[in-house]
Amino acid sequence: MISLSASETTPSGPTGSTATGGHGFSVGGAFSLGDRKTDKARRAAEATDAGPEKVYVDNSARTDLAVSVQHLSITYRTTFERVPTFKNAIVRFGRGERALVEVQALKDVSFDVPNGTQLGIIGANGAGKSTIMRTIAGILPPTEGRVEVWGRASTLLALGVGFNAQLSGRENVILGGLASGLSRAEVEERAHEVAEWAELGDYIDAPMRTYSSGMFSRLAFSVAVHMKPDILMIDEALSAGDAKFREKANAKMDELRKSARAMFLVSHGLSSIRDMCTDCIWLHKGQVMMRGKPDECIDAYTQFVKVGKTPQTMDEM
């Protein structure tokens, strides 16, 4: 189990880990970024009233949930300025300054995902869909709140994130597998299957800086789907590659959907949500507007768009 919370980083034993905003995070028990406490220190912290954000949970026996999100908020700073003046722009340029703007991407989001759920996440651009996926995957630490994940998550959020272009495809396959929490023996066992599925031939041993975008996408997708994830997370990944690749990728996705403990899907193609998901969440400006069956949420969302409440058109969804 992976537990992410906006508190101090504490390991949760062999069954999981706790990660926090500001201190780092752990993914699948394979690696950890941030300060670590000993079991003795953790037990001492548990014995005190540490407040609601400092938690240690042993959920090794829990079988009903795949993911639990509780009061999750994500705030970050960006250099974006909505209405800069010419004078301010000149002054800041001369000083080498950039205006920092605080953006709240998610606001007090809570939901549980039972085992067997295929959850679609819909909403306009900037609603927080990708942010919540990255937080559940352990890529972004929470600013406030907590996320718990039972099992190993494989993400198709941004294909190839973490790949080293100077290394060969095969070397990146090994590193990707180890980062996903697999043992060296498991990685070596699957490396051949990953390479064969990606159809790279001898290029599997060439540096990835020599790859075309199509070769890169095929290998990245193959690495993600061959890690045999408990929880599968997809963010428009199937839009990559040519028609033949997408057909092959869709077939693989169908196979994974049947075996994964839970699946998350973000897609602007609402028909994909209807066809592939059992449940749906509609996000708007970082908040949950509705949770229900795909047809119910999609109908409510499209009606919301039609009456002019958001700038998106049907073609942009």
Image: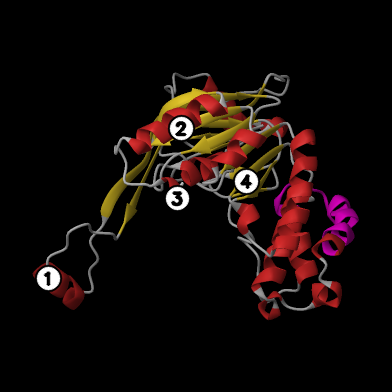
Sort mark 4 into few (<14), some (14-19) or many (20+) by Cα contacts within 10 Å: many
Relative to 296, residue 153 above or below: below
Quick check: is 182 in the magenta stretch? yes
Q: Is residue 71 visible?
A: no
Q: Is residue 303 left or right of residue 68?
A: left
Counting residues from the start of the chain, the first of labels 3 and 2 encountered is 2
Mark closest to the chain's N terminus, 1 or 2: 1
Estimate the x, y position of residue 292 in percent, counting from the top left: 52, 22
Q: Main secondary structure of the magenta part?
A: helix
Q: Amino acid at mark 3?
A: Asp
Q: Is residue 64 above or below residue 277?
A: above
Mark 1 and mark 2: Cα distance apart in space: 38 Å
Residue 42 can be seen, yes or no: yes
Q: Which residue is mark 1?
A: 86
Q: Which residue is mark 2?
A: 282
In this view of the protein, which residue sits in the foreground, 36 or 221? 221
Residue type of the residue flagged with mark 2: Trp
Segment colored magenta: 176-195
Disc 3 secondary structure class: helix
Q: Which mark is residue 315?
A: 3
Q: Is residue 241 above or below residue 138?
A: below
Hey, what amino acid is under mark 4? Ile
Are circles 3 and 4 on residues that touch, CB within 8 Å? Answer: no
Label 2: which secondary element? strand
Q: Amino acid at mark 1?
A: Phe
* Residue 168 is a magenta residue: no
Q: Residue 138: which quarter of the image?
A: top right
- Label disc, if present, on residue 234 of the rendered structure: 4
